[in-house]
Image: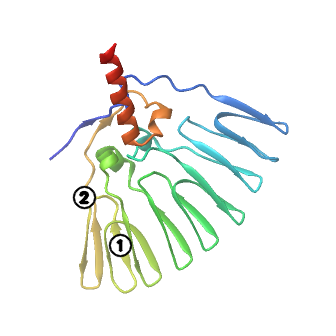
Amino acid sequence: MLLTLLGITLLASAPPAPPAKCLSANGRTACGYSCRASFTEVRCASTPYGTCATFNDRVYCVDPPASAIHHPPDEGLRPECKGIAGQAACGFNCIIAKGQVACARTPYGVCREHFNELKCFDPPEATLHEFGASLPRPACLTASTTLECGYDCKADRSEVKCAATPRGRCEKHGTQLECYDPPTLTQCAHTQPPDPEQVRKPKSQRQDEEQAAEREKTER
């Protein structure tokens, strides 16, 4: 069955995006959001949904893709930055292992470590538009030194293959592993981005606040 989804905002009418700010330090200036400065640089996120952090005198910033902004997870859209031993990364579901750090690009991605390798996987953006917050979380599978993440993963002694979407399938035929992902035919149209402050909150908190606002209206 083909589904045509219309994107909806978290609130009936989202307020305009907050104005960008500029930060100057040590003769350098940058403008945007969540700006941070170190001794050597100044950087800002490009959108009010992004974040920045400073590690080892370097500034790292990340902005979620539009698909994640319009379809935030139930726990809220909160990118993060982590650093260790001179390395840093920003994104979602970050992990630190074996002196390395890695982050997924979206809140629906996963990161895993296997044999000193950190690997992250994110579902395609079209899949985020199709499933939204109900998108099943991908899994990871290992075989010998191989690590792969996705959906319906299959493995033999030394090879792993995964589908890129929840509707994909992988099959093992003898010594061959094959995966197939059907095309995403969903169309998703968005009118305006959601309120940056609201989108960071867990879904349960947003619902409680909306119900409280409705009760306040009825009591007036």
Which amino acid, by three-letter code, is at mark 2?
A: Arg
Give the vertical position of 171 relative to 202 (above or below).
below
In the picture, the disc for residue 167 is 2
Image-based side of 93 in relation to 168, left or right: right
Residue 161, which numbered label? 1
Secondary structure, mark 1, is strand
Q: Residue reaching furthest front? A: 219
- Placement of 49 over or under 83, stated as above or below: above
Label 1: how many residues lie within 10 Å, few (<14), some (14-19) or many (20+)? many
Comparing 101 with 218, the one in front is 218
Which residue lies at the image location 44% right of the left edge and 44% below the top edge?
76
**218 displayed left or right of 75:** left
- Front in this rendered view, residue 104 or 183: 104
Measure the C-alpha gap from mark 2 to mark 1: 15 Å
Check the image and report above or below for 19 versus 125: above
Residue 211 pos. (x, y %): 33, 29
Identify the mark nearer the N-term, 2 or 1: 1
The quadrant of the rendering that contains the C terminus is top left
Q: Position of residue 48 (x, y in %)?
A: 55, 34
Determine whether label 2 and label 1 are within 8 Å by CB: no
